[in-house]
Image: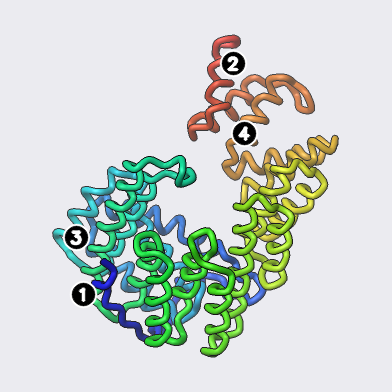
Amino acid sequence: MYMRFTILFFSFCTGFSAFAQTISTDSRICDDMGAVDKTRPIKQEFTKLLRERKFKVLESEFNDRYQQIQGDSMREMAVYALFSFADGGDLTLEPFLNQWVRESPSYWAYLARAEYWAGVGWKKRGNKFSSETSEEQFEGLHEGLEKAVMDIDEAMKINPNNPMAYAVSILIVRAIAGRAEVDKVLAKSIKLAPGNFVVRHRALFALAPRWGGSFEAMDKVVDGAERAKLPKVDVTRLRYQAARERGDHFRFEKNLAAALEQYDVALNFCDGRGTLRSIVQIQAEQKNWPALEKASTELIRAWPEHAYAHEQRAWAREKLGRMKEALPDFERAAELGGNWARNRLGMMHIDGKDVPRDVAKARIFLELAAANGYKNAQENLVKLNREQPRN
């Protein structure tokens, strides 16, 4: 099926704008989640434009942002991240995407719908092990990915020289055709565009051992980038990503000591938020409270607006018997949208332990978390309203 892909590459276009300045290029930060994080509000706006059927405006936005990446890897990744604005988990978007393709069959329309189809497929497949996944679920995955392939083909017919379609396709290649096909198309992309970054970055994920790849294959991608004389910061980002993938592999294998070791290697290259969060998650799973406090403090330093980091430090400090220090983190996490922290504060204000008893404030915290679908808060709110109805 993937022999249908005609993949041509060219050096990334130049330009400069205020948008390009919004994505950090700090060589130390190398933030593996920065591009995605910064595009979140843009994705929300794009979804709004889609629902309003402002298709030409969407196309103009994509064109402008693509012209402004200036070959910078993080800005390039930010543009790539925008294709998933039409979340495959939201099936209500499908008729709008179909209308966009029908009325204005542009390169961007096809790629956005391709990402949507892939998302639908993965949602149908679920996230359980293969042994726990039904044939029907696998069929749903392949149906979604095959639809994505057809849309990527159409996008490439419109603009065969734009590398973004290939970046979208590489994970689909892995899922449908396997590692051998990933190797082929990656080699072709490097031959046609030796300086590309986004495809190499996606290839590191596609070539990870848990998908049938190997550490050696990943190292080959990074070494090739260095031989191709990619900017030093880009090679560093790739080395960081390779080490992070190693850590993820060992974590998947339940070898947490090896995972932490590889995550430390990754952090020698970059202060990556994703790696710091993974370390926090491991220490939380192990209930290593001193290590959890330290790891969450590092994550807060790198990502001060991350509710989860504040929640975990609050939890660690509470378990270490330092509730007075934990409370500011509980409150900050709740302010940032942390539903676990909101539920915890709600219950604390009901009990009147460590904080003044305040049922009205408790109800506010519980209602906020419950409105976001947090099950424990919903149950606690029902109990509170039954035992202490509103006046």
Mark 4 surroundings within 10 Å by alpha-carbon count, few (fewer than 14), some (14 through 19), many (20 or more): many
- Left or right of 194, for residue 234: right
Label 1 neighbour load within 10 Å: few <14, some 14-19, many 20+: some
Amino acid type, mark 1:
Ile
- The residue indicated by pointer 4 is 342
Secondary element at tag 4: helix
Residue drawn where x is 79% and y is 44% of the image: 288
Residue 304 seen in this snapshot: no
Query: At label 4, which amino acid type do we have?
Result: Arg
4 and 3 marks in contact (CB < 8 Å): no
Report the disc number at residue 101. 3
Question: Which of 380/246 is in front?
Answer: 246
Which comes sooner in the sequence, label 4 or label 3? 3
**Picture disc at residue 158:** 1
Estimate the x, y position of residue 210 in percent, counting from the top left. 53, 58
First reached walking from the N terminus: tag 2 or tag 3: 3
Amino acid found under the numbered disc labelled 3: Val
Q: How far apart are the two marked residues, 1 and 2, measured between alpha carbons?
A: 59 Å
User: Which quarter shows the N terminus?
Assistant: bottom left
Mark 4 / mark 1, whichever is N-terminal = 1
Q: Position of residue 211 (x, y in %)?
A: 48, 60
Q: Mark 2 belongs to which amino acid?
A: Leu
Q: Give the residue pinned by disc 2.
A: 384
Q: CA distance from mark 4 to mark 2?
A: 15 Å
Compared to residue 377, the image places residue 230 above or below, namely below
Is label 3 in a helix, a strand or a loop?
A: helix
Q: Residue at x 34, y 58 (%)?
A: 115
The outermost residue toward the left is 103
SS for callout 2: helix
Quote the CA–CA distance across marks 2 and 3.
50 Å
Q: Residue at x 76, y 27 (%)?
A: 355
